[in-house]
Amino acid sequence: MNRRHFLRNSAALLGLGAVEFLPWQAVSAFARELEDFVRGPAVKDHPLRQISKHVWMIHSPDAFPTPENQGMMCNITFINTAKGLVVVDSGASVQIGEMAIRQIKKQFKKPVVAIINTHYHGDHWLGNDAFATAYPGLPIYSHAGTIKEIAGMQGNMWRTLMEQWTNQATLGTRVVPPNTAVDPGQALKFGDVTLRLHHDGTAHTPYDICVEVVEDKLTCVGDVAMDRRIANMDDGSYVGTLKAYAAMEKTGSTLWLPGHGEPSGQVLQWNRELFEGIYRPCEQAIKDGLGLAEAKAQVLKDSRVASRAKDTKGFDSNIGKYVSLAYLEAEAAGF
């Protein structure tokens, strides 16, 4: 029996023994409190490296959460300003957040002064717990829709999913939602650094925020674009993503830092061509009256997709689903 089941069963037995005194809701709360005392193991240190004048990152080499990587699958970015450090996406657990704090304390003698969560998928914000504990009162910025989603169903769902995917290595992580909503185009000034926040409609999710570091001509794109990984499009839009790329290219940035993979000046182009190669054949299949199977065959033959298949993490296991999502989006657009 694993630790989580043991704790739940223990709480259930306590509830049975005190049934006349405690309602079931109290027993459930007690079970959750017990779980909070049991924590997954610490995450090994991952190196901090400089990307531009003001931007540093902890790169995550893995694309998906596993028991072995303990959920370490998302890049964590730090913007070094005269006022302190700003974190863009805090990682997938309290343990990952604590590891990130250890790393920045080795390099910097200044506090974290803000977090920006790019969207509501848990690998990007569950680390808020560690930073909120280490730096009480920390402002955590995001789109208002992201705040609502994390404070609602998405928060506990992602906490539970991450525990399951990592064999409970992330156990002990609390849901700490963002607390400060931002507007599209809003600029946050931290001394010598200006961060402009971009939202161009539904892309990877309905509420993505991309963070432009104006002085460095660098934009943190979250999961709107990835490096050699197909983005999860269950909550997103291919057309909306392509629109977001066009808007971001007008910012003047020349370096794109994704939530997954390596930063480079080619990240948007790589993703655009991949997404065009998935969506446009589906769009044409709808016009030609072809079914999903025929659309998938056309996608796999598209040179933009075929040239990226070998180097794209999760390609074989995900391409069928993502073609299906593109087909459904193109079909809906045709009505």
Image: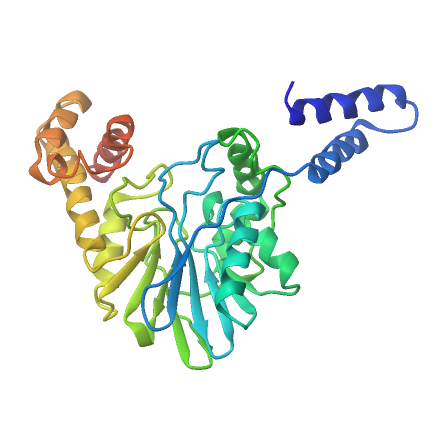
**Is residue 199 toward the left or the right of residue 1 in the image?**
left
Residue at the image point whose x is 23% and y is 47% from the top? 239
Which of the 4 image quarters holds residue 274?
top left
Q: Where is residue 18 in the image (x, y as percent from the top left)?
A: 90, 23
Q: Which quadrant would the N terminus be assigned to in this image? A: top right
Location of residue 81 with respect to 223 vertically, above or below? below
**Is residue 26 toward the left or the right of residue 244 in the image?**
right
**Residue placed most toward the observer, 298 or 128:** 128
Say whether residue 231 is visible. Answer: yes
Say whether residue 121 is visible. Answer: no
Residue at the image point whose x is 61% and y is 46% from the top? 175
Location of residue 169 with respect to 137 vertically, above or below? above
Q: Which color scheme is applied?
A: rainbow
**Residue placed most toward the observer, 276 or 304:** 304
Q: Which quadrant would the C terminus be assigned to in this image? A: top left
**Is residue 113 toward the left or the right of residue 1 in the image?**
left
Q: Where is residue 217 in the image (x, y as percent from the top left)?
A: 27, 71
**Is residue 335 toward the left or the right of residue 167 in the image?**
left
**Residue placed most toward the observer, 70 or 298:** 70
Q: Where is residue 224 in the image (x, y as percent from the top left)?
A: 31, 51
Can you name the residue that lies furthest to the bottom here? 192
Q: Position of residue 295 (x, y in %)?
A: 14, 27
Number of marks in the image?
A: 0
Location of residue 287 with respect to 241 vertically, above or below? above
**Residue placed most toward the observer, 297 or 270:** 270
